[in-house]
Image (tube, rainbow, N blue to C red):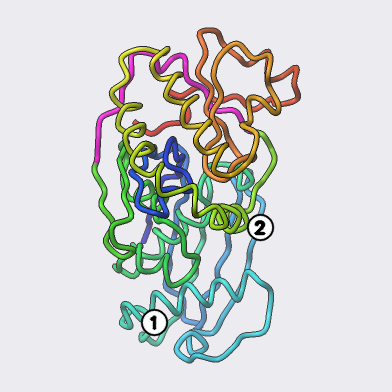
Amino acid sequence: MEFYSAGKLLISGEYLVLDGALAFALPTSYGQTLYVEDQKQNSILWTSYDVDGTIWMQEEVAVEQLLINEDVEGTEYLRTLVKVLRAAHRQNPEILQTKQGFKVDSKLSFLRLWGLGTSSTWINNVAQWFDINPYQLLQESFGGSGYDIACAKHRTALFYQLTNPYHPKVELIEFHPCFKANLYFVYLNEKQSSKAAIETYRTKKELIGSQIDRISTISRALVTAKSLEEFQDLMQEHEEILGAILETQPVQDRLFPDFKGTIKSLGAWGGDFVLVATEEDPTAYFFKKGYPTVVPYEKMIAR
C-alpha cells in the first residue's frame, strides 16, 4: 500500500485560526509518502527517511503493545509512534487485529528542518492507511488547528476555519494571481516551536477578539487581490496586526529593513519560511544576508 500527503504553508490567519479566524493556506509541491507492507513478524517496523535518504527515525514495536494502554519505554520517537498508532487503532480496530505485522517506510520529499509538515503529512498518511478521520487523529495525538491536515488532504489552495476540531470547514479555492512570478518563499533556518509560540499567543487573549474578523477579511482579500501592490498592502497590514498582538517586531523590520518589497512571516513567527513579494528576483539579496534557500512560488506550491 502507498499513501501520499502534501506539505503546507499558512499564508494568513496564523495563531488567530485557533480562535475561529478564516485562514488561507496552500499545499506544497513537496510532501511525504508512506509505504506499508505486510510482514510475518507480529510487529511494526517503522523507518522514516529524510529527503536525502538518511534515516531519522527507526523504531519497532510489537502489535500487541499497541492494543493495550500501558506506558512504553524507549525514545521520544517510539512513544510518539505508539501514541499515534493507538489513537488510530481506537478509530479503526480492524487493521491491527490481524496476525501479521507491518513494515512501514515513510519518505519525505522536503528537508525535515524546513517545517513544511513532517508531522501533519505523517498523521494524514496514517489516517489514510487506517481509513479514519485525520482531524480526530491529530487532536488525539499532536493537537493544533488542523489547517495542515487540510493541506495534506488536498492539492489546491483553501480557506480553513476551525468550526469543529473533528470536522472543520474547508473551502477549496482557486488562487492563480497574475503576480505569482513575484512571490517567493525564503527559509530563515530558525526553527520555531509551534507549541511554545501558541502558548505565548494565548497570553494575549485581550488583544485577539477584536482582530478575528479583520484577519478573516484579509484572508479573503489576499486571494482576490488584483495587483502585487494590493497583495503587499494586505501582507503588511496582517504583519502589523500580529505584531501588535504578539508584541513582537515583524520579521522585515527585525532582519531586512532595507529590503525593497514586502516580507510576511508564516506559521510560528520568526522561523521556517517567510513569504516575499517583490518586483525583482530577491535571491541575490537574501544570499548576501546569509539565507541561500529562496524558492519561487511556482516551485513551492502544488498545482
Compared across the picture, whether 5 is left or right of 103 comes to: left
Q: Residue 182's spot in the image, x, y percent? A: 47, 14
Compared across the picture, whether 200 is left or right of 164 comes to: right
Residue 273's place in the image compared with 55, above or below, is above
Type of the residue with mark 1 = Leu
Nearer to me, 20 or 140 = 20
The residue at the point 65 percent across, 34 percent down is 249
Compared across the picture, whether 283 is left or right of 140 comes to: right
- Where is mark 1, residue-wise? 96
As for residue 183 lying within the magenta part, the answer is yes
Disc 2 is placed on an element classified as strand
Type of the residue with mark 2 = Trp
> Where is residue 259, by image quadrant?
top right
The residue at the point 47 percent across, 64 percent down is 143
The residue at the point 46 percent across, 26 percent down is 235
Nearer to me, 226 or 299 = 226
From mark 2 to mark 1, how far is it between C-alphas? 25 Å
Disc 1 is placed on an element classified as helix
- Where is mark 2, residue-wise? 56
As for residue 213 lying within the magenta part, the answer is no
The range drawn in magenta is: 172-187
At label 1, counting other C-alpha atoms closer than 10 Å, the crowd grade (few under 14, some 14-19, many 20 or more) is many
Q: Which image quadrant: the C terminus?
A: top left
Q: Residue 201's spot in the image, x, y percent? A: 55, 52
Q: Residue 238's spot in the image, x, y percent? A: 47, 32
